[in-house]
Amino acid sequence: MYVQAKLQFQAVLDQVFSEYRDVFGDLYSKVSLRFLALYPTSQSVLAMSQETVTAKILRLVGHVITNRWSLEKTQILIAAAKRNPFKKTAFPSHLISLELLINLLLYFQNTSVGNEIMFLSKSGMG
């Protein structure tokens, strides 16, 4: 189930913000998913200043992290938004699907049931 959610998430993301994939290193990290839940399109990223994007990333990290790391991620994110071939989302349903899948992935990461499903999928049992 977790693997299916990840695959569906990737398919939808490719149609909305395909360049986002490599921004945070781990596409499924909590920071990456939470940022994408708030700003799911390249258009929403480009509408903010670099300082605002950096501040949003720092807030999502939730612990003290170097400003250098968040600034680097901001620069990568803005460059990815500029490269993104989809300047506007073709179908609003993609954004709804993306939000639902992000919430599902975060649920898996934040619950004991979800952790068990993730463990099974990684070990080849699920």
Image (cartoon, rainbow, N blue to C red):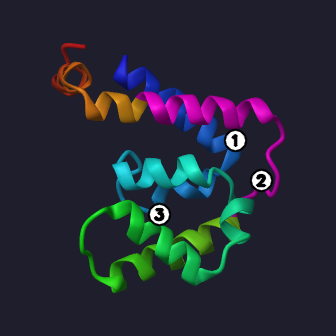
Locate residue 59, reporting x and y percent.
40, 66
Mark 2 lies on a secondary structure that is: loop
Q: Position of residue 11 (x, y in %)?
A: 59, 34
- Mark sitting earlier along the chain (3/1): 1
Give the left or right position of residue 90, taking residue 84 as reference. right
Q: Secondary structure at mark 3?
A: loop
Q: Quadrant of residue 118?
A: top left
Count the labels in the image.
3
Residue visible at 77% across and 53% down in the picture: 86
Q: Nearer the viewer, residue 121 or 113?
A: 113
| Magenta portion: prevailing SS class | helix
1 left or right, relative to 8: left
Classify the position of the C terminus by image quarter. top left
Which of the 4 quarters of the picture holds residue 19? bottom right
Label 1–label 2 contact, CB within 8 A: yes
**x and y percentages locating residue 96 in the rendered image:** 67, 31
- Badge 3 amino acid: Val
Q: Position of residue 122 (x, y in %)?
A: 21, 28
- On the image, numbered disc 1 is attached to which residue? 15
Amino acid type of the residue tagged 2 in the rendering:
Phe
Q: Secondary structure at mark 1?
A: helix
Residue under numbered circle 2? 86
Q: Does 54 sit left or right of 67 as displayed? A: right
Magenta residue check for 102:
yes
Which is more N-terminal, label 2 or label 3?
A: 3
- Circle 3 crowding by C-alpha within 10 Å: few under 14, some 14–19, many from 20: some
Residue 23 is marked as 3
Mark 1 residue crowding within 10 angstroms, few (<14) / some (14–19) / many (20+) = some
